[in-house]
Image: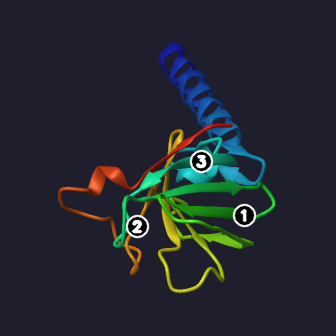
Amino acid sequence: MKKVGLSVLVLAGLVVACGMIVSCASVGGRTSGPHGSRDSLDWWGTYEGTLPSAGGSGMRVKITLNRGGTFEKVVEYVGREGVFTSEGTFGWNKAGSHVTLEGIGDGPATYWVGEGFLLQMDIEGNRIEGELADEYRLEKIE
C-alpha cells in the first residue's frame, strides 16, 4: 500500500512539474525555445560600415531598423559626391533571421541579423561567398 501511495505521489509531482514547464514556456503568446534573431536579439538600432562596391573604393552604408518595422538606409560612395537615402518598411523571413528592406530599388535588400551586426546578402537573398564575404558586414552602433 505504501509503495502504491508513493508511486501516485511521485507521478502527481511529475504531472505538476510538467504542467509548470509547459505554462512557463509560453510567454507573451510565444513559446520559448530556439527563435530567430527577431525574437531573441535586440535587433533594432543603427548599423554601419563600408561595404565593397563594383565601381570604386566601397560605399559607406548606414541602416537604422525601427521596432515598428520601418527603416532608413543611407549610402555614400567613397570618393564620389552625393548621399542616397531610402526609407520604407521591412519584413522578416519565416525563420526570423533575415530582414528584407522593401522598395529600395534593384540593389541588395536582404540582411541576415546577428548579435550586434547585419550581414548583407546577395541580390537573390543568399549569403555572399568568396574572398570578400566577410566585408559585407555592418556593425551596430546604437
Residue closest to the eye, 132 or 32: 132
The quadrant of the rendering that contains the C terminus is top right
Which residue is painted at 54% across and 70% down in the image? 93
Residue closest to the eye, 107 or 60: 60
Alpha-carbon distance for marks 2 and 1? 17 Å
Q: Which residue is mark 1?
A: 71
Q: Which residue is mark 3?
A: 47
Which residue is painted at 69% across and 53% down in the image? 30
Is there CB contact under 8 Å for labels 3 and 2? no
Q: Quadrant of residue 71?
A: bottom right
Rendered image coloring scheme = rainbow
Q: Residues within 10 Å of mark 1 (few under 14, many from 20)?
A: many
Q: Residue furthest left?
A: 131
Question: For the residues carrying marks 3 and 2, which lies nearer the camera in this image?
Answer: 3
Classify 121 as above or below 107: above
Task: Give the residue type at disc 1.
Answer: Phe
Is there CB contact under 8 Å for labels 3 and 1? no
Q: Earlier in the sequence, mark 3 or mark 1?
A: 3
Q: Earlier in the sequence, mark 2 or mark 1?
A: 1
Task: Give the residue type at disc 2.
Answer: Met
Specify whether 86 is left or right of 117: right
Q: Secondary structure beneath disc 2?
A: loop
Residue closest to the eye, 140 or 4: 140
Q: Which labelled disc corresponds to residue 121?
A: 2
Specify whether 92 is left or right of 71: left
Instruction: From the top left corner, tell me how far across and down residue 3 is, in percent.
Output: 48, 17
